[in-house]
Structures are given as C-alpha cells and as structure tokens.
Amino acid sequence: MACDSWRNRIAAYGDSELSSSEMRAVGDHLRTCASCTSDLLARVQLKRAVKSAGKRYSPSLALRQSVQKGLPSRSNVAWIWNWQTKLAATAAVALFVFGSIYGWSSFERKRTFAELADLHVATMASSTPVDVISTDRHTVKPWFQGKIPFTFNLPELGNTPFTLEGGRLSYLDQAPGAQLIFKIGNHRISVFIFQNRQVRPFTLNDSRSRRLTFNVETWTADDLRYFVIGDADANDIHKLSDLLRLAAGS
C-alpha cells in the first residue's frame, strides 16, 4: 500500500526520534492522510495511557524513607564500629533522600516535557488542530474566556515572521490551559499556558532545552507558566518567547 512506507515511521515520529527533515516530511504527509493520522493518534493515546497508569503506582518519598528507617542494625559489633556505622547510615539516608527528591523532581520535569511533546505531536497530526481558527489575537484570546480560569495577553505579530493560526483547550495533569498554534515558515510551534501552581516546578536550568527533535522554552509571568515547543530553530523559539514575554508584561 502507498502508506506502508510512512507507517513504518509513524512510531518514531510519535516519539520524536526522527531527524528534523524527516519530522517535517512525516508531518506534511499526516496533514493529507487520515489513515496515518488515526494511526498516530492511537499510538499517542496509548503512550499517554501507559504513562498515566505507571504514575498511579509510583512509590512515594515517604514510603522510601519508611523503608530506610525500618532496616535492622547490626548488634554484634564493637561500640565504635556501631557508632561509625550509624553515622555512615545517617549520611547515606540523607544522600538517598536528597538524591530521591532531586531525581524525582528531574523525572517529573522530564515527564512534563514528554507529555507536552505528545500533545504537540497529536495536535499537528489532527485534522482539526485548533478549536478557534483565526490570525487575529483579538478573536483568539476572547474565545478562551469562561473555558479556562485565567486570562493572558497575545503579542502583536506585525513585522515579525510569525503567524497566529488559532488555539484550543489543553490539559496537563487534568489542569485546563490554553494551547496556541503559531507558524514560522514550514514549522508550527505550540505555546501552552497553564496556571503555575498547577504544574511541576522548574529551575532556571530548565528554561531552555532540547528534547529529542523539539526545542523547548519555559518561564513564568503573572502566576502563569508558559511552554513554547516545536521543531523550529532554537533561535525562533526564543524570539517567539520574547514576544510572548513582552505581551505578558503589557
């Protein structure tokens, strides 16, 4: 069949494991092929369901600490050895707790980026990527009123290489937010906006990064958390982020 060669790359596309040129080629094909689009959406939905199920059974930090405290101590050694052992054990537990907190936080942040990448891919593959179609920010912004518990500002894009294509509702950990689609050249960029308290904390080191084939930038403004993600050049992601920052401060 004509789509067999494309289907072999659908899974890699959904996991963002293709090169930039291949991602663009598959993306262009998906916009014209309903069969491959359905295949991709099914894969993305299955991937998110597996992640959600796995999160339900993740051990908590409290459980890990409880297990550490319940470990038996050796009673048949000299006092000095016992003292040193206890000191070493205390240090080990402290390092374990610190490592667990840091490692868990890092895992949670990476999971957030992965979920947003899935949302971006699913949107790009959908036959109806936006719920409100307009290049006018004064049309797109009011559409979200009453649908999300916050408001936001959009930049004026005149004399810039960016075009607003529209927006749609999006959810991250069941928290409602806005997903805006911008275009630059042949690339599309998703801008996700959520209430900052509804998403996992991020550090300055997380503000700009590359996740597989996607560039990502994130920051906060007025208690809102912004994520800008796409396969566009990192400089273009940053330029759009700057425009959004200026709009948020106006």
Image (spheres, rainbow, N blue to C red):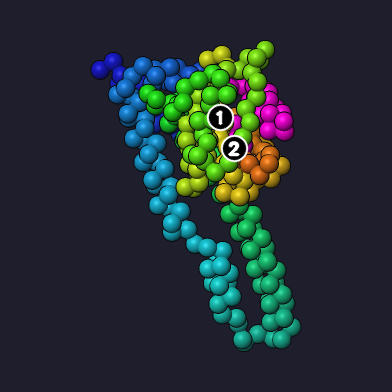
Q: Is residue 244 left or right of residue 184?
A: right
Bounds of the magenta segment: 226-250
Helix, strand or loop for the magenta stretch, by majority: helix
The question of residue 233 being in magenta is answered with: yes
The disc, 2 or 1, on the residue closer to the chain's N-terminal end is 1
In the current view of this chain or complex, which residue is farthest to the left?
Answer: 1
- Residue for point 40% across, 36% down: 44
Q: Tell me residue 112's x, y (percent).
A: 54, 43
Q: Quadrant of residue 61?
A: bottom right
The numbered mark at residue 166 is none
Q: Quadrant of residue 215?
A: top right
Q: Tell me residue 232's x, y (percent).
A: 58, 22
> Which amino acid type is shown beneath numbered disc 2?
Thr
Is the residue marked by circle 1 packed among few (<14), some (14-19), or many (20+) residues within 10 Å? some
Q: Secondary structure at mark 1?
A: helix
User: Relative to 88, is 231 above or below?
Assistant: above
> Which amino acid type is shown beneath numbered disc 1?
Lys
Is the residue marked by circle 2 packed among few (<14), some (14-19), or many (20+) residues within 10 Å? some
The numbered mark at residue 141 is 1
Mark 2 and 1 residues: CB-CB less than 8 Å, in contact? yes
Q: Is residue 96 left or right of residue 170?
A: right
Q: Quadrant of residue 46?
A: top left
Q: Tell me residue 133's x, y (percent).
A: 47, 22
Residue located beneath label 2 in the image: 151
